[in-house]
Amino acid sequence: MDPIYTPEQLAEVKAYHEPRYLVSAVDFVFTPLVLTAMVLFVTRPLWRLSSRLGERFEAWSGGVPGVRALARVGGVLWRGAGWAGALLFALLFFELFSLTDLPTEIGLGYFHEHAHGLSRTTPGVFAMDLLKAKVLFALAIGSLVFGLYGLARRTAHWWWLLGVSASVLMLGSSALDPYRARLYVEQTPLEAGPLRERITALMAQAGIDFQDVLVDQTSTRTVRVQAYFAGAGPTRTIVLNDSLVKELSTDEVLAAVAHEAGHVNEPRWRGRVASAVVLVGFLALIEWLFRRSASRRWFGIEARADVRTLPVIALVFTLAMMASGPVSAAVSREREYAADRYAVELTKDVAAFRSMLRKAARVNKMDPSPPRWVVLRSWSHPPITDRLEALESVLH
Ligand SMILES: [Zn+2]
């Protein structure tokens, strides 16, 4: 097998990845440490500040007609006074925590990407994307506070009620995926022509229904090529980006689409049941924390379901994610090999699949030989060299 890169290209790819691995290793140690320090030293003073400001806001809002209606909704959701302080506490806590991440987010996400020729985004667009992500995050925190704590303040059965209903909602949430992407990039339908015809024929051969083939207009922001399927059932959409359509031959694009098709019929029920069980278990653990914090008077808490438990919950959640990350990444890597095999069996064109992988690797500057710990910790895809090697045994 020919090497993917010349020695000079390989040196550049390594120079791109090494700082990222370093930051990831540092993050792994520092994130839990920073969160622990915040739980211990920030919870009390932040609560004093936000509950005082919240009380003032609620008192003031009673006299302002438009705001009064809003405040009443907050009070109903929260069940009583104190909703503004609770919301402010949660928003400020996560905002402070995300500030610790901001320098690397800008350093790696903007400057490092530009230095290695992968990003084309302007400072304005980059800032706007950051802002959009922050607004979405704040909305999520708001729903968490009112949903989880609001419900827990009403009934001690909240943990299984919420766990079961969230698990059911998650079954349908992937149907909304095609709409989420549109918050960030412009999409246009793939023009009529040989590529669209061949994709349609390939999907018919695979027995997969889809709504449309769309092209993400990402080339003003990034050099990278990408293809994915969004949505499920009637909303399933095949998404290619404009760079992929431009850089790859028709056979190579078809290879990429065939790989994505390999993910469509993956067995999902075992994973769904497992995540429902894990979610209900985690919420039961939170209920235990609610009771424990009230009986032990943590941070001055006197009753269960006090929002001052949120930092502890964030810490427990982070540790659980760090522990389970390698397991879900390993499952995902196995599925990528299976999707590669499926694609080659579908198109019967192993040469196009191989050249698609090699081209995508070069354009996206994928590391052909990442350190093993990096892969084991979090990579959802196997290294490109491993994927090419695994292809050798397909169709032989
Ligand atoms: Zn895949």
Image (spheres, grey):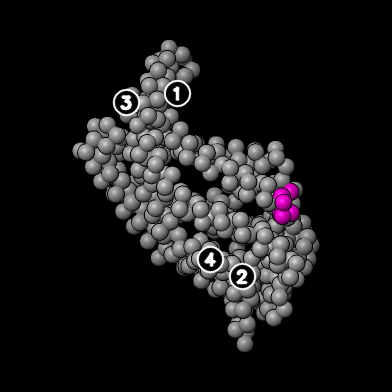
Which-is-in-front pick, marks 3 and 2? 2
Lower position in the chain sequence, tag 4 or tag 2 = 2
**First in sequence: mark 3 vs mark 2:** 3
Name the residue type under label 2: Ser
Q: CA distance from mark 4 to mark 1?
A: 48 Å
Quarter placement of the C terminus? bottom right
Element on which disc 4 rests: helix
Residue found farthest to the left:
295
Q: Amino acid at mark 1?
A: Leu
Vertical placement of residue 102 versus 83, above or below: below
Residue lying furthest bottom in this view? 396
Q: Residue 214 placed where, x, y %?
A: 69, 55
Estimate the spatial distance between the alpha carbons at disc 4 and disc 3, rounded to whole Å: 49 Å
What is the spatial separation of the Cα atoms under label 3 and label 2, in whole angstroms?
57 Å
Residue position for label 1: 70
Q: Are marks 3 and 2 in contact (CB under 8 Å)?
A: no
Q: Which mark is residue 80?
A: 3
Q: Amino acid at mark 3?
A: Gly
Real-space Cα separation, disc 1 to disc 2, in angstroms = 55 Å
**Segment colored magenta:** 114-120
Q: Closer to the N terminus: mark 4 or mark 3?
A: 3
| Up-down relation of residue 295 to residue 351 (above or below) | above
Asked if residue 247 shows in the view, the reply is: yes
The disc, 4 or 1, on the residue closer to the chain's N-terminal end is 1
